[in-house]
Image (cartoon, rainbow, N blue to C red):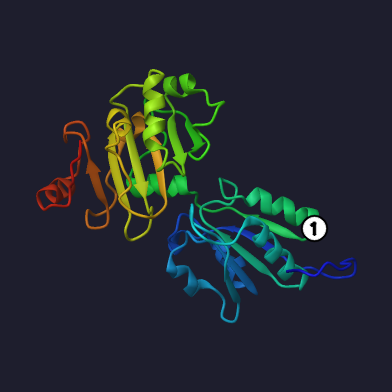
Amino acid sequence: MSERVDRTFLNPGLVSLIGAGPGHPDLLTIRAHRALQKADVVLYDALLGEGFHALFPKGALAIPAGKRCGGLGATQAEIHELLLEHAWAGRRVARLKGGDPLIFGRGGEEAAFLEAAGIPFELIPGVSALQGAASAAGIPLTHRGVSREIRILEGHHLLEAGTDWPELARSKATLAVYMGTRSLKAVARKLLEHGASSDLPIALVECASWPGQRTTISTLRLAAEGHLCPLTDGPGLVLIGAAVSARVHPLQPSSFVTLSHEPSSAFPRSEGEAGAAGGGRERRAG
């Protein structure tokens, strides 16, 4: 715990709130890497690949400061306390956060806390989970003649009162649902109840940019019936909209597995993916 003393004559260190990207260290920006190399203390999130540890400066104190949904880990208050403790000791602190710190990363809360405490800080953007998932799955978030808008939603509270379901169901936007794997079935049902097309494409991208990444492509109807389920314990992001059907195939089938609940005519696959189906890599449900 930090000491509660008069800080008037002390010189605090600098806190860098760094977006680390969706999980793979290759997606760390040059600016983020430079800030990380200057750190005396690294407070890092749970949703980062092990390869990040090799980038930590030698001699820096590395502290895990994050948690997976429903798991054990540091509370936000404890993270604030760690930032305060090390910054007031004059240390440079790298707060390494998954994705972009200002998109469902609580970076705004940490920045506001530091500002109120008089701690100098900087915000360094990162590749968001949305961008990482779309690129990993080969799904254009916007596509000419198909989708001109992206709607970013938060799955934990989307089903609470106040959501304009008729408007979402009518929208031609690509809907991106963070932390939406647990509410996926209910969200699909709500959209159908309010007029969305039953064959609207939906994708679940898990562990984007990680070695075990998985992408499952289905339809809103099948998702509402419970046929679209997570295949890993990793982070997942849900993409809903016509742009999903404009998907391309930038990765080799060995590192990118697509599971489709619909006939291949509905969701065209690459030759590699089609061959994988015959080899037992493709699963069908529903």
In the rendered view, would you say 114 is above or below 285?
below
Left or right relative to 226: residue 102:
right
Report the number of discs: 1
- Most extreme residue toward the bottom is 59
Q: Is residue 13 visible?
A: no
Left or right relative to 2: residue 42:
left
Quarter of the image that includes the N terminus: bottom right
Secondary structure at badge 1 equals helix
Crowding around mark 1 (Cα neighbors within 10 Å: few <14, some 14 to 19, many 20+) is: few
Q: Residue at x 63, y 72 (%)?
A: 41
What amino acid type should be assigned to the residue bearing mark 1? Ala
Quarter of the figure with residue 96: bottom right
- Most extreme residue toward the left is 278
In the rendered view, would you say 65 is above or below 136?
below
Q: Which residue is mark 1?
A: 117
Q: Nearer the viewer, residue 70 or 39?
A: 70
Residue 33 drawn at (x, y percent)? 55, 66
Q: Is residue 149 visible?
A: yes
In the rendered view, would you say 205 is above or below 114?
above
Q: Nearer the viewer, residue 209 or 250?
A: 209
Residue 236 drawn at (x, y percent)? 40, 48
Quarter of the image that includes the C terminus: top left
Residue 159 drawn at (x, y percent)? 49, 32
Q: Residue at x 61, y 50 (%)?
A: 106
Residue 192 drawn at (x, y percent)? 36, 23
In the rendered view, would you say 91 is above or below 133?
below
Q: Residue at x 38, y 47 (%)?
A: 135
Quarter of the figure with residue 121: bottom right
